[in-house]
Image: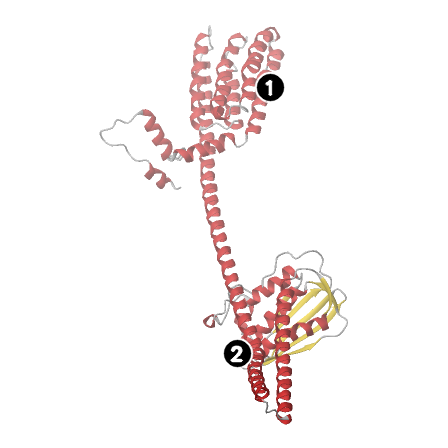
Amino acid sequence: MSSSDRQSLVRPPAADQPVSLAQRVVGLMQRIGLRFEDAAVERHFVETFVHGSLRWTQAAMLLGAMTYAGYTFWDWVLYPEVVPTTLAIRGGTALVVLLPLTALIAFARNWTEPILLLYCVIPGCVLPFIYLVLPSGFTFASAGMIIVILFVSTMLPLRVGSLLVFCVTTWLAFAFVEWLAPSLPSGLGFINHFLIGNAYLLSLYAVGAREYRARRLFETTEALRRETARAEASLQALQATQAHLVQAEKLASLGQLVAGVAHEVSTPLGLALTTSTTMQGDVQGLSQMVGSGQVRRSELVRGIGRLEQGLQLTWQSLHRASEMIHTFKQVAVDQANEQQETFELQGWLGATFDKLKPLLARRGLAVDISVPPGVLLHSFPGALGQVMGILAFNAAEHGYPNGAGGVFTVTATQPDPATVRIVCADRGVGITPELRDRIFDPFFTTSRDTGSAGLGLHIAFNLVVSTLGGTIELIEQESGAAFAIELPTNRAGTPAATHLS
């Protein structure tokens, strides 16, 4: 809050309303930046400023009580005959006032400022009476008062208002006790009041500057806290939106899978239905022939042969449909499986792409696998299967657009016993240089007009890094796009995040 903003918050009272002294003081404090216009903000600041370091404040108060009583040592060095009196005054003040207030401040947090004010005012008003019993009188009085002022202004969390009360009361007490003194050297009173007055002014300035900086820091901290809260709320909203879009992408992928499954299964089921309908007609014809009593051997043999052929074709069609359903079910089960397994990479890749071939063939994509035998992985086959599927379908859709068709190659090598490197590549249109750094970003796609959400490669990246514990990167090649995946042969522990289907 700038000074102009603070001044604008100080609204002048109506002309017909008298302005009290308290209102004038509050307005002045607001204009110079030592008070907030909002009462709730002011209370929060006071709570933070006064109570923020209560243990350190108690430590300072304990030190002050010990120091106040400890100055009796110097009385003993200079004037041993008055030590009983000064010890009674100093020690009594420390034991009866300062130490109890030090303990009380921990149990009366709402009264912290009044307690601190009493802690400062009482010893400050008592101190001048000690100079009445010292043989030196008020010769060293200004030094003693300045030490008290220095302690109060630097060691305790007083605000300017409380310090001003301390200054006025202790100065009046000093002047009153000085008036009670039997006699003073010429000019000593002026010197004492001049030095003590300067100490008061300097302490007021120092405490005011400290409070001003504390208020500006408080404003900055509160603004930062509000901005952080807004940023966190925005981040949560963004994460919720991202989760919603990811879910939408998953549903869209599920819709495509269902459509593909329906298309693949409908062909053998339709053939079985057509064949069964034809067989039903043949059975009815044979039944009528038998019922009429005119049965020819040749027609009976021909009818039974047609039925055998129909049953064979129906069985083959239903068996084909059953195999497809089992295959698609196995793909879904594998991708939902989070259990670590040990599997041989060559055979596993062959079985995985055999399951995906019907869907990939519809897009004109052929798969060429070149993997040496005997490469064992102990990892999450479901997640790896998802990555392979995402890269294959990404090649079919973006590498060979408009159903152009092509080859998707999968090669694997083992640079060392602990690592497997899998390269998935196509010879399609490739990825332009300006897009290469963004392909793994969420929601980045060049085919949004066709319904792509841009999450495929982002999901693949998360699966490889979080679930499989490896790396994936786009590598250079003459044409098309190639992705290099490096995986540990033994994935230890559980995946860092649940993979997305």
Left of 141 or right of it: where is 488? right
State whether residue 300 is above or below residue 44: below
Residue 401 has which mark? 2
Which residue is painted at 60% across and 71% down in the image?
A: 391
Q: Where, quadrant-wise, is the C terminus in this rendering?
A: bottom right
Nearest the camera: 233 or 293? Answer: 293
Residue found farthest to the left: 16
Q: Is residue 449 something one can see in this rendering?
A: yes
Local packing at callout 1 (Cα closer than 10 Å; few below 14, some 14-19, many 20+) is: some
Name the kind of residue labelled 1 in the image. Answer: Met
Instruction: Report x, y in % for residue 105.
Output: 53, 23
- Check if mark 2's residue and mark 1's residue have beta carbons within 8 Å: no
SS state under label 2: helix
Local packing at callout 2 (Cα closer than 10 Å; few below 14, some 14-19, many 20+) is: some
Instruction: Report x, y in % for residue 158.
Output: 48, 27
Instruction: Report x, y in % for residue 40.
Output: 41, 34
Residue 66 has which mark? 1
Q: Where, quadrant-wise, is the N terminus in this rendering?
A: top left
SS state under label 1: helix
Which residue is painted at 58% across and 22% down in the image?
A: 62
Residue 285 has which mark? none
Q: CA distance from mark 2 to mark 1?
A: 87 Å
